[in-house]
Every structure is written in C-alpha cells, then in structure tokens.
Amino acid sequence: MKQYILAHDLGTSGNKATLFDEQGVLVTSRISPYEMDLYNVNWAEQDPAVWWDAVCTSSRQVLSTIDAHQVKAVAFSAQMMGCLPVDAHGKALNPAILYCDHRSSAQEKQLIDRLGFDRIYTTTGHRPSAAYSLTKLMWIRDNLPDVYEKTYKVLQAKDYMNYLLTGEFATDYSDASGTNAFDLHTLDWSDEILDAVGIPRSLFPTAYPSTTQIGVVHRSASEQTGIPEGTPVIIGAGDGGCASLGAGSVSFGKPYLYMGSSSWVSIASRKPLPDEEKILFNWAHPVEGLYQPCATMQTAGGSISWFAKTYLGNDDGKTMDEVNVRARQSKPGADGLFFLPYLLGERSPWWNSKAKGAFVGITLNTTQADHCRAVLESIAMNQKINFATMLAEVPDRRVMFIGGGAKNVFLRQIFADVLGCEMAVPQFLAEATSMGAALLGGVGSGLYEDFTIIEKMNPIKEVVEPNQQLASFYEDLTAQFVGLYRSLEPWFDR
Amino acid sequence: MSDTLILSLNLGTTGCKTVVYDDQGRIVSSWLSLYRVIYREGNKVEQDPDDWWRAVCESMQKVLRGIDLTSIAVVAFSGQMMGCLCLDKAGDPIGKAIIWADMRSDKEANQLLTQIDESLFFHITGHKISASYTLSKLLWVKNHEPERLARTAKVVQAKDFIVSKLTGVIVTDHSDASGTNLFNLTKRQWSRTLVAIAGINANILPEAIPSTQIAGKITIEASIATGLLPGTPVVIGAGDGLCAALGGGCTTEEDAYLYYGSSAWIGMAKAQPYWEPKMRTFNWAYIQPGLVSPCGTMQAAGSSLDWLKDEVAREEGNQAAIQKINAQQLIEMLVQQSPPGANGLMFLPYLMGERSPYWNPQAKGAFLGLKRNTRRADLFRSCYEGVALNLKIIWEALRPINAAKQLVVIGGQASSSVNRRIIADAFNIPVVSHDHVRDSKNFGAAILGGIGIGLYEGVDVVKRLLRYEQCIEPNQESVALYDRMLPIYEEAYDGLKGYYQRIDRCMTGG
C-alpha cells in the first residue's frame, strides 16, 4: 500500500502542504497564502487563526488527491523566533509577534544589562537580540500585563499548530534554540537567563528532539483538516533546521548555502561554534546530537534585484539574466570595482544595522558590466567571510546550493570560484523546508529508515568545480573587501 | 561685418578650436578640428605635435573661408598646460608630446620630494610637486631617454610649439611657465634653484614673456600652410586655465569663477599668491603682470557626469535617442525628482584620481550609502552633488581670500541650470552665467590678442563685452543641508584613503 508523509511548511507569506511518498518522492503540494500585519514602524504580527485556516485548507486540498488514511504521519516546518502567548486551554491571547518584529529593543537592552552580551551568546549560541522570543515575551509582560497574567505557555508557530492537532504543548530543540532563553549545551531552558530577567521557566513548553511523536490527530482537528483521527504527529522543526535537512545537511559537515532575497550558509557540527567575532549563531540541529552554526546576510538576491531595477533601470522580470549577461563581459575582480551589499544593514558577518551599500573603485573605464560582476562577487565574498569559521571545522569542500539564487548558472560558478569549493545543485531548490519536515515525519514515524533518504529525495543534478587559480585571487580580493568595509565602518555611523 | 577681426585658437586635449571674433567679441566663425590622445601602458598619455599642427592649419582654413584676410588683426592662443614637448635646434619635435594627463613620472615626483622641502617648493612655484607638471616629466625623459634630452634645444607647451611654427620664434608666456613646476611665481622668471636641483640645462627653458606680448609675425612658410597673410602679428596668449579665467570675466580681486567642463576649477585674480596651509590649491601667474591666480582644479567633474550618462544612464540614453532630445536633459529631469541630499546617497567623483583638494592619483570614485529604497533619481542626483561637494571643499579652502559677491560659472556644464542651482546652493553664493560660457578659453585668448595689438586698452574690456544673464540665488534650506553634508562627505574620503592605497598595491601586484 502507498504511504505518505504530510509535510507542512508554515512560512511568513503562507502555508504549504506537501505529500511525499514512502520513497521520498514529492507527490503534490498546495499553498494557502496569508499576509503579515506590519505597523508601528517595526511591528510584525500574524493572527494564529489565519495560520490554522491555511493549514486546514491546504491539508484538505492535498489529501483530496489520495486516500487520507494512507498518511503515515504529519510534521511541520515553520517560521521561528516568534512569540505567541496562549492560556491553559490553548486560546491565543495575542496575535503572534513574528521574528522580524523589533519592538522589544528596550527589553533587549535590559537582557544585555542583566547578563552581558557574551554570556548570552555562549549560553544560547545567539547574540542577545530583539529578534528572538524572550525579549518579545518580556515586552508583553511590560506592556500587556493582562495578557501576561493569563499566559500559560509561549509557543512557536509550529508548536501551536501541533497543539491544535494533538492537544499537547511541546516544542523541539531547534525552535527552542531560537528563543534566546535555551541553553544550547544542556538542551534545556536556561534558568540563569530566565531568572535574570524574571521569567518563569514554566511558561516555556518542554523541548524534545525534532523526530519525537508528540501525539495523534484528535477528532475535532481531524474534522477541520481532513487528516484522519489518530494520525501520528511528529513535532518537526523550525524552518532553518528543516532547510538544512532538505539541503542534505543531515550528518557531520555537509555545508550548504541558501540564496533567496537573503542568504545564509550553514553546516552540521558536533558542537556549537561560538566564534570570537560572534559572526555565527548556532541552532540545535534537527538531527539529534548535531548543531547548526549559521550565518545570514540580509540582502543577497535582494541586492541583485535592487541593482537590476535601480541601476540598470530594468523593470521587467528578466533581471537575473540581464545581470548575468553583462557580468560575463567583465573580468574577475570587476576591474577593481567593489560592491558592499548592505542595502538593509547587515547581520553576518558585521552585525551592523547602520551599514549601507556602496560601489567603490569607479574610474572612467568602469562599465555597467563591471557593476554587474561586482554585485555578484560581493555577495559571494560576503558569504566567504561567513563560511570561513565553519569550513575550518569540517573536511567537506562541496557546498550544496539551494534557493532561487541556485538557478543562476553564472552565480554558481562565481560562488565556486570565490569560495574555492565545489557547488552542488540539487533537483529541488525551493522545497528544502518541506523536505526537511517530511524527513522528520518519515524518520520519526519509521516510514524512512534514516535521514540519508534525502540523497534520493533531492538528488544532486550538477556539480560546479572551482577554478583554483581564481580561488587564490579571490582570497586576496576578499581581504580587500574586508578592508573596504572596515574603512567605511566609522562613516556608516554618521 | 567689422574690419577688425581677431583669430583665436585654443589647443585643447581633444582638439583645436579656432574662432574668429569681431572687435565686439562676437563670434564670426568657428571650427573644431579633432586630434588623437594616445594612451599607453604605465599611465602614459601623449599627443603628436604634428597632429596639433594639422588641426591648426585645417581649422584656420575653415574659419577664414570668405573672410577678408587683411581684416585679421591678430592671432592669439590658448592651450593645454603642464605638458612636456622637446624641440631640437631646428625647432622640430623630438618624439611625442607628454601631456598634462600623463602620470608616468610618479617616481620622479617622489624623488623631488626627497630633494627639496615641499613647502619651500610651494612658495617658489605656487604649486605642489606632482607628476602632473612639466618638471617631473622632463626628469622622466632625463632618466629614461637621456639621448632625447641631449638633443633638446627647448622644452615648450602646446601653444608655444604652434607659435614657433607660425613665427619662427620659440617663447612661452608667464602663465604657461607657471605650470611647469620650474618657474618662480613671484619673480616671474625660471627658478635657478629648481633648475639646479633638477640638474637640467637652463638654456632649454624658453624665454617667458607676458601673455599679451606679440611673439612674432606670420612667416612666409606659415602663410602658405595656414592661409594667413605674412606679417600678421601673433600674440603668445596664455594657458587655457588663465584664458578661461579672463574669458569668464575674472579681472579684479573681487571676482571669482568656476570653470565646469570635463575637469573643473575655481579661480580668482589676486595681488598675492595664496599659500593655502594644506597646499590643497595652487597659484598661476595671471595674464596681468601684477596678479596671480589662486586656483584649485578637480580632475573628473563633467567627466563624471559623462560617465554617468554613458554607463549608468543607458536607458535614458536610449530614450533620448528615440525622443531626439539631449540625454543629459533627460537625466537632469530625474535629478530634480530626487531631493537635495539625494536621500542620503553620496558620490565621490574621483574617477581619475584627484588633484585638488587631495592630490591623490590612487583615489577612486564611489557611491556610498545605498539602501534598498535608493532610487535611480538618487543615483543621478548624487553624481551632480558629489562633484559640487568636492568643489565646495576647494571653495572653502579659498574662502580666506575670497571677496566675490557672485560666482561666474563657465565651461560646458555651465549651460546646465541644474548644475548652476546645485553650485549656488552648495557654495551659498549667487551664480551667474554669460554669453561666452562655451567659448571662454577662445574668448579670453582673443582679448589677449586684442590687448597685444592695442585694440583694447586692458582687461577691463572683458566686462563690457560680456552679456551677463540669469542670476541664481542660493536657497538657504539647501545651503544649510550642504553645509551639514560637507564634513560627512570629507570623512568618506578620509575613511577610504588607506583602502585606496591598499587596493592600488594589490592590483598592481606591488
């Protein structure tokens, strides 16, 4: 009999339900879109009822194509670092405050003042920041006392969906590691941090490995979603972790690079990699026993589309092609022209919200082609800096390349040359998070023997070799790139 | 038509522009003959003096067509400065002319810095030591082609060579001499100290005469080549920077002008040289014997805007071609859609390195402060403002001696009202233009010619002949903004200074 995993990917712009069969083959998927509520400059919220509606709708749609009883398990990938307070009956007390909401900057300061920046970084694997759940919860305590008083648990997006399916309050290590309140070394909530800011640990649900079955679909959830009552629910992981799985990063090493509008690089390590510069941040990996050091740049594909539109004056959809065609006419090094891709400030490697974009090195001979190439090279050099600490830890010199940016053939070569690594491009570039959820569901439910099935689910289609001569050239160029940023660092503060 | 005509030639970098003026300064005929700029490896930039001569002959024949040759009262010159052309005993060129833009002699300039205190040098010549000038170029010839120097009878500037072809007399004028780094500015004679330090034969320096002096008369041979009547007087004229100053109407200590062409400079006329404490500006010998012209020149002004037009604004270029309008006009419509300050975007116009204010050949251009909401109009506006802010640094450097109540803007970019507006706001001074902004160098040379033959009494005639127009008053809100922006703009360069040095080493493999 055919068997399926129902994988959900609950993102910022919609929920995607996908069915994978027992071989790991992607059978069908449906997206139910929704909006983000943005206001007060830096607030970003979503109503969790909207999430649930989307989960119900998309589940019904994909299940209508099969016999729903063939679903072996359900599992989620979802947006991380949020804050949704619920009461003991699982009723949402406030809209979910999302990862990109920065209202809690006063609480961020308080957190740092109480414990120190370094202590929080080494304990949680992350810099203390208003981006994470803890300061958002502190904000609710400080500004919405009624809500705070009634709060029984604080949940992540997938945890709430899991609760609605099963009636269980729980989270997994990966999502817990995105709260700024979780001790990455003990894989438990940090009493030191929680005591310092006066938040009781009881507000956080127990954290489990990501493959744990936390319950089964109960009757009323079954009626709403169309998933048969009693179907096992595997807890799943945050979308960052699921993307790693989908990119094949399921055992030690296995570096990968995601490039969409933003871009991140990551590997699977045996321990967190807190570096001196605090370039990296560390998640608990969805594969038990592993960690996921990660570095995210803000505007990667975002830089290219800005450039094509604003600089080339190209408003149609062929932006990427246009940039590539012209970039090929320039030479490695773009004739001395550098781009700083900091159009929205930068996270890794600089963590400087005041950083800005720049073209530097213009002469009368500088062409549009040089500008195009400089934009692409700069993104790769920025990621080379981000990768440096990680790649020093692992023997692998093959980087999986996923996300929309991986479609760009020319960019593959640029990354290969700049990083000095093979770039491996798998069949599915945009399905990594859903595949990660499916892997967790499959392994957690026993449908898949282990995580290596990902090699069949998302096979490598092309490997781009680096040009070794260029790699040493880019080594030097990247040092200049760093020097350029350092030169302008004081200016960005002006 | 008036029976007294002046034939004025300007030997620029791209070509020779020849204009016939009547005695009221009106253009009777005009012609531009282009010639080559030869770029060679190692920052070498040369021109063939025979090309200059061909262009002179061609353009003269063109402008003189239909003109009664007896009415040509005088021929006068403006020319590119700071070059190095070696002539043999017969007055023939030995090799090509090394022109102002040539930067091959960086080592020689650095060598000079070890031989003489730069501040002392500045007080002798009015200039810094730099590879831009004749002296270090001549030293390069000495070091690399000693046989060329051994055969050299005279070292001259472009206009001097053409004057010698026309008259058989080899001389130069005070203004061009003051652009060689070998001329004592206040004594108006070749500096024996510097000649000694350079270790060259003083005889190879031509006699330097006032810019209004008649150098000689058209010879029979020159008459055959050019069509001019033999015996027509030839006034030596001046370097193009000074001809522009005069043509711009700068004649008294209360005047200031901005020449805004491919390069741009701010100049004045003063009784005393200005010893700018940081040596950011320099001094020429002016065309009036008692005056010097303090000045600061930036390299890529209009050139930056041309680069913007040719590389960044290709879409607008295509649009303009379809609509059959000028691309710069289309660009400037966009410039006006971005507010003063270009939404925080800054442009550093160091596309050719920089002379004033930084004297740094390694400097490069930059867009700084790009954000995701930066628009195309902001990119365009930042270029216009970047040039203006760099000029503002020069303007502020000259402020202690500046007595001008208004600024005359001349040069090709002076026709842009967007440029005049931004300059007025950046400098906080009313900006005017006049009817000779595009031919100011030729016009200045013509005045020198007229004075040389006694047609005009003195330089004051310029203000009578110019028709001033369109005063743009500064907008105080923008003035305050540009004042706030200036230190930030300067800090951007300061921040990048070390980077320019490192990347230069990296790229040249040094």
Image (tube, coloured by chain):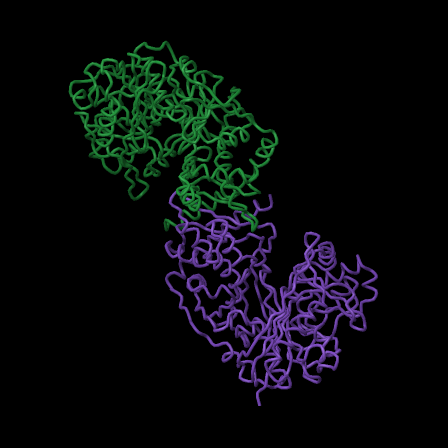
> If the image is split into quadrants, where does the N terminus of chain B sit?
top left
Q: Quadrant of residue A348?
A: bottom right
Q: Colour of chain B?
A: green
Q: Residue at x 44, y 51 (%)?
A: A371
Q: Residue at x 81, y 72 (%)?
A: A88
Nearer to the camera, A379 or A94: A94
**Numbered label tally:** 0
- Reply above or below: A280 against B253: below
Chain with purple colouring? A
Q: Quadrant of residue A61?
A: bottom right
Nearer to the camera, A360 or B74: B74
| Residue A132 on image: x %, y % | 68, 62
| Residue A373 on image: x %, y % | 43, 55
Left or right of A230, for residue A335: left
| Residue B169 on image: x %, y % | 22, 19
- Reply above or below: A472 against A32: above
- Reply above or below: A191 against B329: below
Nearer to the camera, B14 or B276: B14
> For the view shown, which residue lies furthest in the front direction?
B323
Q: Residue at x 57, y 46 (%)?
A: A490
Task: Work out whether residue A119 can be spotted.
Answer: no
Q: Quadrant of residue A160?
A: bottom right
